[in-house]
């Protein structure tokens, strides 16, 4: 997926497994990111059981903002 390099070079997640790995990586930096859970809300919503995988504008914005 993306493990080599920095968070800024991570490519967009294409499935729930990639997204979980990305969110796990961010957990390490959570104390340095104010309002992290608010920024990531659209991405966390993608991981809900009843939610279909649809990467749209709000998810892309959250992904770019957190990077």
Image: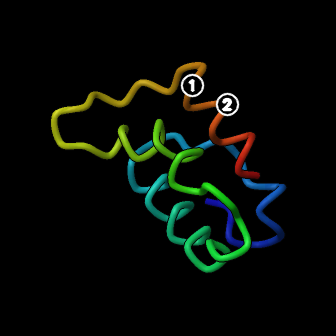
Give x and y (percent) for residue 49: 18, 42
Residue density around tag 2, few if under 14, some if 14–19, many if 20 or more, within 10 Å: some
Which secondary structure, mark 2? helix
Residue 17 horizontal/vertical position (percent): 40, 56
Q: Residue at x 52, y 40 (%)?
A: 14
Disc number for residue 61: 2
36 sits left or right of 16 in the view? right
Among all residues in the image, which is located at the extreme top?
Answer: 57
Point out which mark residue 37 bears: none
Q: Nearer the viewer, residue 1 or 42?
A: 42
Identify which residue is drawn at 59% across, 45% down. 39
Closest to the observer, 38 or 20: 38
Which of the 4 quarters of the picture holds residue 57?
top right
Residue designated by label 1: 58
x, y percent for residue 11: 71, 47
Nearest the viewer among 4 and 58 is: 58
**In the image shown, does 63 or 40 lie closer to the viewer?**
40
Residue appearing at x 44%, y 60% in the figure: 20
Q: Label 1, secondary structure: give it.
A: helix
Please say if the residues under marks 2 and 1 sit with CB atoms less than 8 Å apart.
yes
Q: Count all numbered tags in the image, as a single digit.
A: 2
Residue at the limit of the structure toward the front, as seen here? 34
Q: Is residue 31 left or right of residue 64?
A: left
Q: Position of residue 40 (x, y in %)?
A: 54, 47
Q: In which quarter of the view is residue 31 placed?
A: bottom right
Q: CA distance from mark 2 to mark 1?
A: 5 Å
Label 1 crowd (10 A; few <14 / some 14-19 / many >=20): some
Image quarter of residue 5: bottom right
């Amino acid at each position: 997926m993306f493990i080599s390099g920095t968070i800024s070079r991570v490519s967009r997640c294409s499935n729930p497994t990639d997204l979980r790995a990305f969110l796990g990586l961010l957990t390490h930096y959570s104390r340095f990111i104010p309002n992290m859970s608010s920024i990531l809300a659209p991405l966390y919503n993608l991981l809900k059981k009843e939610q279909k995988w649809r990467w749209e504008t709000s998810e892309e914005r959250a992904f770019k903002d957190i990077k």
